[in-house]
Image: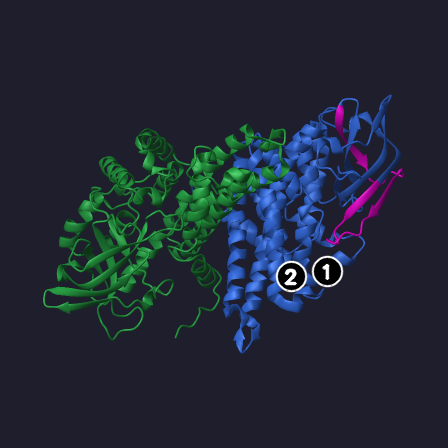
Amino acid sequence: MDFKFTEKELALKREFEVFFEAEMKKAPPEFGNGGLEAIYNTDEGFQFHKYMAERLAETGWLRLGWPKKFGGMEASIMEQIIFDEVVGYYSAPGIDPFAVGMFAPTLMAGANDEQKERLLKPIGEGKAFYCQGWSEPDAGSDLASLTTSAIRDGDEYVINGQKTWTTGGHKAEYMFLLARTDPDSKRGKGLSVFHLRMDLPGVEVRPLLYMDGQHLYNEVFFKDVRIPATDLIGVEGEGWALTRQTMNFERSGAGGFSGAKKVLEDLLVYVKNTNRNGKPLSKDPSTRRKVVELYIGSEVGQSLAHKIADLHAKGDFMNLITTASESKLFSTELAQQLSNYATEIMGPYGQLQHDELAPLGGSMAELYQFCKGATIFAGTNEIQRNLIAWTGLGLPRLKFK
Amino acid sequence: MDLSYNSEQEMLRKSVAEFLAKECPFDTVREIEDSEEGYSAKIWKKMAKLGWMELYFPEEYGGLGDPFQDLTIILDEIGKKAFPSPFFSTVVQCGITLLEGGSEAQKKDLLPKIASGKLIMSMAQLEEEASYLESGIQMPAKLSGDEYTLSGKKLFALDANIANTLIVAAKTDEGVTLLLVDAKNPGIACRKMGALGKNNCCELIFNDVKVSKDAVIGQPGQGWNILEKMASKATVAKAAEMLGGCYESIDMTNVYAKQREQYSTPIGGFQAIQHYMANMKLGYDTSLYYMHKVAWMTDEGMDTTKEVSALKAQVNEQYKFITERAIQIHGGIGTTREFNIGLFYRRAKAFEYIMGSTDYHYDLLADALEM
């Protein structure tokens, strides 16, 4: 067993750190504490996201793990995880979670050559930004029950229905859509993947504000929206299999642990320099206990991320699915514990989010709210537990009607 | 990075597992637990012949010079079988103490005896105050001429009832001093304490016990330093043993959940059970991967001050959590003496105290973070 990073990996890590250390100084005040809300809530935040995407395209890191034939660097999975860790540490934008994180792998797996040229290339150049058209009001965890329809009409498909929880739907120019092309089909059969322009007639985006008023999520309504048949990705009716591949890209969570480590560094400075009842908080037994519990969480979590890299490199995909679910579960629950403990340690200051007296720039009061989204999106933590039980422990799968 | 064991290590794991499965099934574990000696001399001798006790010792002391990781593999397997033996007290605690602090003569004399299974040793450190800190060691060793005189009480000494030799941590003018003491000295009264782990957890009362100056390990006053070095390894080794117990508890519960039917369906098909088990597996996997990392760091000679405390606190809590849920899933049968999961539930609590409780390690870690 060997946990050593190679010289090449260490050199890359330093290169990433130097880049983000410099670039993140350019973040506008509206970018705040990072995270999805920083990208989508303001125009300034989204502009910075776009700027970082172009910079990352120039360095090639936007296409770090992509095959060479698509202009990628074919970096190893460990190098990709190191990159994710550095990005997570700096809460940096630029890697569009939907375009780069999800739709690009879908295109590589299912698109024809014309689509790869037309759609994949701009994503790799940091010029195309997407939102995800999966969830519907009645299709959340049970995504395969979705009803938005795409009916073939000559050289076009006609879209009708509604999507929801569409993060960044008000900023993205494009959506990748999962819709039912066979109206008589049930569940996974008869679903197809599409590329869709958000400015088409019949597409209506309505904000779905987060509990603190920030704008990330939207509802998207489709009324007789006509899209060219050339924007069908892969084979009609085979979209579910393609989507399931993408789901695995959605879960790995390496950045979550390094992000937690950064917060802990800041929290340690805070507890050493803040007095309560005549002594630094760092000498208060209850504070000490909370901080070390968080430290342990971020430490053991990071070893999960490295295990994912190792399993991927060895082609152990069954254990990879389990470990990816574990990582999503662990990192999002760690974020909840982190924000709750940090705001407890701060005492009444813990409630300050947008205030000059807010410790850690109000980031913990903000995380206290946004961490609740994370245990729900990208496969709820209950779905992750099911997957661990089924794939990791071989327990019987639930039977669906 | 390569996070797999090599083929030799896998062979070692297999041979320990097969040996213990044959020699010490769970019924035998219960018999040993109920015996006064608390170990099987027969199995102990066989183990010695297989070379596991000397494996981590350097070649110049008759060992194999294998990496620390290999020692954790043995303890992992011991943990899976809930195997009661003086391996941890003798090979890990005392063996490593001798390696870290002993004179050449002491190492050449004692380590081969440990390796051959002829010498059982016990570490006598904790006292009535039950503090893991240096200040918890107050029992005096008074020097007069060429002899120290020991008087006082030591508690929670593992396997002292079957030991030939004790390592006693005592207070001298120079500070904490470690002394090798003949366990059969008539001035020592040993009493096995009635602990829930049913392990050899002993009280030792020293009544004017005379020990030669030559019996000091290292130099007088170096004792705490040597104990800290030993602890940085023994704590990881104990964590490995505890993780073996976690693995077996989950495995046993998984098998049971697939067999046990209620409402005409295996209970493992119920989501409530599946989510308990997913949490158990998550707790185990994260802790295991972290232990692998800390064991590797130990072999690399890296500073593991923070990691060792993080690991032990994590494993203390996860072992208790996993075994508690395991019994819950087993239902009433899990609470009985005849059923095996209780062996692990009790060990989770008993081992929590060995090489430091959660609170102790939380505090050490907070100190290491300069809080």
Q: Is residue A61 above or below residue A241?
A: above
Residue B192 within the segment the image draws in magenta: yes
Mark 1 secondary-structure assignment: helix
Which residue is rendered at x = 17% and y = 53% of the image?
A199
Residue in front for this viewpoint, A314 or A209: A209
Residue depicted at 60% across the width and 60% down the height: B325
Residue type at the position of mark 1: Arg
Q: Chain of mark 1?
A: B
* B143 or A302: nearer the viewer: A302
Who is closer to the viewer here, B53 or A301?
A: A301
Q: In this orientation, does residue B113 appear? A: yes
Question: In the image, is A33 to the left or to the right of A342?
Answer: left
The region drawn magenta spans B175-204
Residue at numbered disc 1: B30
Q: Residue at x 20, y 56 (%)?
A: A195
The residue carrying mark 2 is: B341
Q: From this viewpoint, is residue B77 visible?
A: no
Residue A124 is one of the magenta-drawn residues? no
Q: Colour of chain B?
A: blue
Query: Gap between marks 2 and 1, in whole Å?
Result: 12 Å
| Pointers 2 and 1 in contact (C-beta within 8 Å) | no
Crowding at dot 2, Cα within 10 Å, few <14 / some 14-19 / many 20+, comes out as many
Is tag 2's residue or tag 1's residue first in the polypeptide sequence? 1
Point out which mark residue A225 bears. Answer: none
Category of crowding for the residue at label 1, using alpha-carbon neighbours closer than 10 angstroms: few (below 14), some (14–19), many (at least 20): many
Task: Give the quarter of the figure containing the C terminus of chain B.
Answer: top right
Q: Which chain is green?
A: A
- Residue A293: give x, y in percent of width and height: 56, 42
Q: Both on one chain, marks 2 and 1?
A: yes
